[in-house]
Image (spheres, rainbow, N blue to C red):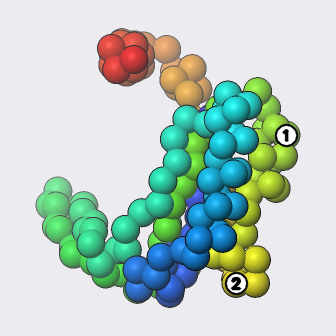
Amino acid sequence: MRFMILVKATAASEAGVMPEASLMAAMGAYHQELAKAGVLLDATGLQPSSKGWRLRYSGGQRTVVDGPFTEAKELIAGYTLIQVRSREEAMEWARRYPAPFGEHADGEIEVRQLFELDDFEPGEEREKFRDLDANRR
């Protein structure tokens, strides 16, 4: 089972404020524990939305909207992707996640389970995705 731990953005992260060394050390130690346990798949921080864009789809049209985007609480500042045996194991790891902006700063993480190919109906299209995944590895 794969889970994504999403770090919600703040006004500071959207302003490009970089984490203090102590927070980097705590995050590094946590992610080293994940790697040592063999459950870490990927992890990184994201640049502020001012460096990104969105694509909107409506009425058969695509529109590009440049950042920055308002409502920092709706944005993601980073993520950690893990593969574990159960929801409970994912929750144990999430509980150990360091406070994402420091122990005394407000912050929030969200944990979501990823779909696996076997969650979808069997068929030719699902197998094409399975082949893509196999070729990627």
Quadrant (top left, top right, bottom left, bottom right) of the C terminus: top left
Residue depicted at x 69% and y 39%: 34
Residue 88's tag is 1
- Mark 2 nearby-residue class (10 Å; few <14, some 14–19, many ≥20): few
Question: Which sits in the foreground, 82 or 56?
Answer: 82
State which mark lies toward you, 2 or 1: 2
What residue does disc 2 label? 105
- Residue 10 left/right relative to 3: left
- Residue 47 left/right relative to 122: left
Asked if residue 123 can be seen in this view, the reply is: yes
Instruction: Reply above or below: 92 against 103.
Output: above
Q: Amino acid at mark 1?
A: Glu
- For marks 2 and 1 on the same chain, the one whose residue lies earlier in the sequence: 1
Residue depicted at x 47% and y 76%: 18
Q: Amino acid at mark 2?
A: Ala
Residue depicted at x 47% and y 60%: 45
Residue depicted at x 69% and y 76%: 102
Number of on-image labels: 2
- Mark 1 nearby-residue class (10 Å; few <14, some 14–19, many ≥20): few
Instruction: Reply above or below: 69 against 128.
Output: below
